[in-house]
């Protein structure tokens, strides 16, 4: 705690959501994707409304303003919270604290008034439809939005000024993850009844104004809707208000709970604050997008304008008018051929042809991919920085995390682009290249997991000779061997596929290029290629299976000879994470590759699991089950490898 002349607090400590280091990492990995999604979602709505002239109406003008406010509102608190979660320094200066409080109430108060304004807009649209364009003209809309910003400024200035007048002489620990009125007023060291009354009166006045306007607007709206005779007309009128009403509930509910009561801290305060500072700004664009056909249609039009350009997959030559072979293959758009025989690009059909599901898949895959990159990068960085983890087991673990990160990156970024692009094409060479790297990195990981089983065998069965057997040179040679083994396997898989003839059709029923889906499209005999494919995969699977099986037979037999229960438990715990990862990795691979090229309905779902989910689960399994890794992450924070204490 820093004080001026031992009386005036000049900085505070934000205690955050939890003082448990393990939970700090979990919160960081949860909040970061949520914040990125909030930024992406709200920016997408703003760009869509700006670009599409069909959405240049009062309702969407207000919606774009709300998206901007949501983005700003979340940005006031989340970046600082993320910084505090990965840094030992939780301090915030008095002035920065007041500034954060000011902007929190500025954007929050403005959004409150804007939601009220949007209710009035719906009232005019439904109750006075013929006069709507006259009443809500361009000038009026700008003036109304400007008034919400002015009102938000007045409200926040009042809140910040009154809080600034409070005397703080200690303690200085704020039991929250950001600076707000109630947590600060609890720390004041004099009678604050008068100031607190003014703060509540200020919040109460805003709430009362907004509540009355909302209530009167919706009374008018509902009474008008009930007079509509047709059920379809009533449904359509209600649907224009449903999204707004949902957002109002999500916004005002937590705010009323937090601000319209005396400054007594409840255990639920921080959880409620998470909801309205992090989740609500994310949910607002989702609600308006999923429930609004006009916005969804506009996003499709935005996509067709080549925001994600189709030209990025465009062949190097153009279709000629006299090429009659397009009729021969059903005029499949995007299929290009040379001399009417050779397919030069494929179309990836992906997981679903439903445009609405494409957005859902995009959001899910993006979150999982960001978590995968963050989690695996964190494991690699922790092991690299912390000297306590410079052992063979953690050296192999860092390599596994790098392989997981690379394996996911081979397929996911392109899949994400395809979700948002009308052009799903991939050139023949790019397809074979993607296929090569899927098998290169995937098989290297399979061999690497086998190597890790051998490492556990030496550690448990020959503990006294472990450091001699698994010395630095041996470890490096073994890892190089796994990469060479993966490269050899990938060449063996890719070469036969590259020799196949593809003359049509060219639609791959998958979200990435793989051997089974490609061989199904070949118009030449695939028997030899398929046998070579299975023999190659079978040899790799056999090597890995026997390597893992024999290692674990010896490991289990050695563990069972240990007399103490604690000794057996400790020995088993060093293998549990590895064994779980082996099952997650080899199970789906055996299902997909150790059988003839017949497509099962579950193939794509299994592929999603081992290409996207497994690379995310591996760092979680090793981190949550390994006390050494968790301690190393604490030490990493202590070393301020992410951010030093002098940032604040």
Image: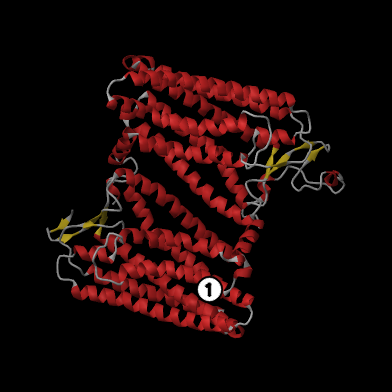
Kindly give the residue lying farthest to the left in the view shown: 6
In the picture shown, does residue 52 fall above or below 120? Answer: above
Provide residue 110's location: percent of width, then percent of height.
41, 71
Is residue 119 in sight in this rendering? Answer: yes
Between residue 432 and residue 128, name the one nearer to us.
128
Provide residue 571's location: percent of width, then percent of height.
34, 25
Residue shown at 48% from the left, 82% from the top? 219
Provide residue 578's location: percent of width, then percent of height.
43, 29
Residue shown at 20% from the left, 58% from the top? 10
User: Relative to residue 231, is residue 584 drawn left or right?
Assistant: left
Q: Dot 1: within a 10 Å radius of its alpha carbon, few (fewer than 14), some, or many (20 or more) residues?
A: some
What colouring style does the render use? secondary structure
Between residue 526 and residue 372, name the one nearer to us.
526
Q: Which quadrant of the figure has residue 77? A: bottom left
User: Relative to residue 365, is residue 500 drawn left or right?
Assistant: right
Residue shown at 42% from the left, 40% from the top? 375
In the picture shown, does residue 214 fall above or below 278? Answer: below
Q: Which residue is mark 1?
A: 241
Provide residue 355's location: percent of width, then percent of height.
63, 55
Task: Report helix, strand or loop for mark 1.
Answer: helix
User: Relative to residue 316, is residue 301 drawn left or right?
Assistant: left
User: Relative to residue 158, is residue 355 drawn left or right?
Assistant: right
Q: Which quadrant of the figure has residue 149? A: bottom left
Is residue 437 in sight in this rendering? Answer: no
């Amino acid at each position: 705690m820093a004080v001026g002349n031992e009386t005036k607090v000049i900085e505070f400590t934000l205690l955050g959501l939890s003082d448990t280091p393990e939970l700090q990492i979990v919160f960081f990995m949860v909040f970061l994707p949520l914040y990125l999604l909030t930024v992406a979602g709200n920016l997408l709505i703003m760009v869509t409304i700006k670009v599409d002239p069909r959405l240049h109406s009062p309702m969407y003008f207000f919606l774009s303003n709300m998206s901007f406010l949501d983005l700003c509102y979340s940005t006031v608190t989340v970046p600082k919270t993320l910084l505090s979660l990965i840094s030992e320094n939780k301090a915030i200066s008095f002035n920065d604290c007041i500034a954060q409080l000011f902007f929190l109430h500025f954007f929050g108060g403005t959004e409150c008034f804007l939601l009220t304004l949007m209710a009035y807009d719906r009232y005019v649209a439904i109750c006075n439809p013929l006069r709507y364009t006259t009443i809500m003209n361009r000038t009026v809309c700008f003036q109304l939005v400007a008034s919400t910003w002015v009102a938000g400024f007045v409200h926040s200035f009042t809140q910040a000024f009154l809080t600034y007048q409070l005397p703080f002489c200690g303690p200085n620990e704020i039991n929250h993850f950001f600076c707000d009125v109630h947590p600060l007023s609890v720390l004041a060291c004099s009678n604050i009844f008068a100031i607190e009354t003014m703060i509540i009166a200020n919040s109460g006045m805003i709430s009362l104004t907004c509540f009355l306007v909302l209530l009167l607007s919706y009374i008018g709206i509902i009474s008008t809707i009930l007079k509509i005779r047709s059920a379809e007309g009533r449904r359509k009128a209600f649907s224009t208000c449903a999204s707004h009403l949902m957002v109002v509930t999500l916004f005002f509910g937590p705010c009323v709970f937090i601000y319209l009561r005396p400054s007594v801290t409840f255990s639920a305060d921080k959880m409620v604050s998470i909801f309205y500072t992090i989740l609500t700004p994310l949910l607002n664009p989702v609600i308006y997008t999923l429930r609004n056909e006009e916005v969804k249609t506009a996003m499709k039009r935005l996509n067709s304008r080549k925001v994600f350009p189709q030209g990025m997959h465009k062949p190097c030559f153009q279709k000629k008018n006299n090429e009659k072979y397009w009729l021969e293959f059903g005029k499949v758009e995007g299929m290009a051929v040379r001399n009417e025989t050779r397919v030069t690009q494929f179309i990836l059909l992906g997981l679903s042809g439903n445009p609405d599901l494409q957005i859902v898949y995009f959001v899910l895959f993006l979150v999982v991919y960001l978590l995968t990159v963050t989690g695996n990068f964190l494991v690699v960085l922790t092991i690299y920085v912390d000297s306590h983890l410079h052992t063979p087991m953690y050296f192999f673990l860092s390599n596994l995390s790098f392989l997981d990160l690379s394996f996911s990156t081979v397929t996911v970024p392109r899949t994400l682009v395809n979700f948002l692009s009308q052009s799903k094409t991939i050139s023949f060479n790019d397809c074979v290249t993607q296929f090569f790297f899927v098998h290169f990195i995937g098989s290297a990981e399979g061999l690497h997991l086998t190597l890790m089983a051998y490492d556990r065998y030496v550690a448990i069965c020959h503990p006294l000779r472990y450091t001699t057997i698994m010395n630095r040179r041996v470890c490096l040679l073994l890892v190089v061997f796994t990469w060479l083994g993966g490269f050899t396997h990938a060449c063996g898989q890719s070469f036969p596929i590259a020799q196949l003839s593809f003359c049509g059709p060219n639609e791959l029923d998958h979200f990435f290029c793989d051997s089974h889906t490609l061989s199904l499209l070949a118009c030449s005999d695939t028997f030899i290629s398929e046998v070579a494919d299975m023999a190659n995969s079978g040899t790799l699977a056999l090597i890995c299976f026997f390597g893992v099986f024999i290692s674990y037979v010896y490991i289990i037999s050695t563990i069972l000879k240990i007399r103490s229960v604690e000794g057996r438990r400790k020995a088993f715990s060093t293998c549990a994470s590895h064994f779980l990862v082996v099952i997650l990795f080899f199970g789906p691979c055996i299902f997909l590759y150790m059988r003839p090229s017949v497509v099962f309905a579950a193939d794509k779902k299994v592929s999603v699991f081992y290409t996207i989910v497994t690379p995310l689960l591996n760092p979680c399994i090793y981190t949550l089950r390994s006390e050494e890794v968790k301690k190393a992450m604490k030490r990493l924070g202590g070393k301020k490898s992410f951010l030093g204490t002098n940032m604040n």
